[in-house]
Image: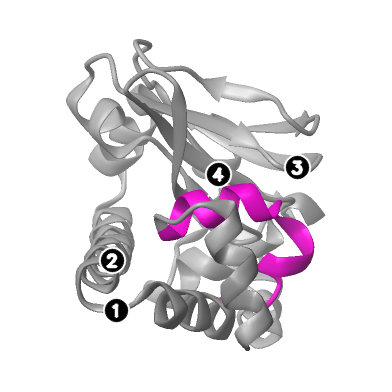
Amino acid sequence: MLNITILENIKNNAMSTIPAPEYESLLAVFNSFYPMSEALIEDIIEQSEILDIKKKTVLLRAGETSNTIYFIVKGAARVYYMEKEIEEVTSWFLFENELLISVFSFFNGQPGFEYLETLEDCLLISLSRDKLNSLYERHLEFNFIGRKLTEYYYIRNEKQANDLRMLSAKERYQELLATNPQLINRVALGYIASYLGVSQETLSRIRKQI
């Protein structure tokens, strides 16, 4: 949920340029990790781009190199890969105030194996890898923000991997609903089944038991 106090602090910081409404959630998230200078805020706005993307748009395909990181202002998306070239396996669901990225390809600058796809009409803020690195070079505090975000998503990924190894399918589904209650109303059951590592029929049986 958006931190109103953080937003008010940003707006009351005597900035020469008031951020557009589309940037409020992004700035609130970043500012929650470390106080942002006016120069950094203005540089982020100048270097990034606001995108209106339709539902079911593939932003990145396997074999392509990821050069862009996205912040979801509004909407939902997923990250998936192809298993044995015939079955889609969903590895991430992303919603408002989260970053959409193919980690391996983006940070290595090499062709990746993942697809990035919007599940709803999305309002995104995009930033290229080159511009992100330039922001790191010009603004010391942004390196701290970047490190804390990396830690957050690494821990989240590790928890997901551990859950897949240690929890039953039913327990994984219950955990997913507890942490993402909006998921069931916004994501197709087939994608959820893929994320949990079960068939859609098995997921249907699990849902009847709960």
Q: Are marks 1 and 3 in contact (CB under 8 Å)?
A: no
User: Rounded to the nearest whole Å, what is the CA distance between mark 3 and mark 2?
Assistant: 31 Å
Amino acid under disc 1: Leu
Q: Secondary structure at mark 4?
A: strand
Q: CA distance from mark 3 to mark 4?
A: 14 Å
Sequence-first disc among 4 and 2: 4
Q: Mark 4, residues whose alpha carbon is within 10 Å: few (<14), some, or many (≥20)?
A: many
Inspect the image, locate mark 2, and give the three-letter code of the amino acid beneath it.
Answer: Leu
Residue at 76%, 41% (x, y): give it: 122
- CA gap between label 1 and label 2 equals 6 Å
Circle 3: is it few (<14), some (14-19), or many (20+) Cα within 10 Å? many
Q: Quadrant of the N terminus?
A: bottom right
Report the disc number at residue 78.
4
- Label pair 4/2, CB-CB below 8 angstroms: no
Do tag 3 and tag 2 residues touch (Cβ < 8 Å)? no
Residue 162: % across, % down: 21, 71
Instruction: Give yes or no for contact between labels 1 and 2 (Cβ–Cβ under 8 Å).
Output: yes
- Residue underneath mark 2: 164
> How far is disc 1 from disc 3 in space, using C-alphas?
34 Å
Looking at the picture, which amino acid does disc 3 mark?
A: Leu
What segment carries the magenta color? 180-196
Mark 1, residue position: 167
Q: Secondary structure at mark 3?
A: strand
The location of residue 106, given as percent across then percent down, is: 30, 29
**Mark 1 or mark 4, whichever is nearer to me:** 1
Vertical placement of 89 versus 165: above or below? above
Q: Earlier in the sequence, mark 1 or mark 4?
A: 4
1 vs 3, front mark = 1
Q: Is 156 on the left or on the right of 36, as rendered? A: left
Q: Quadrant of residue 187?
A: bottom right
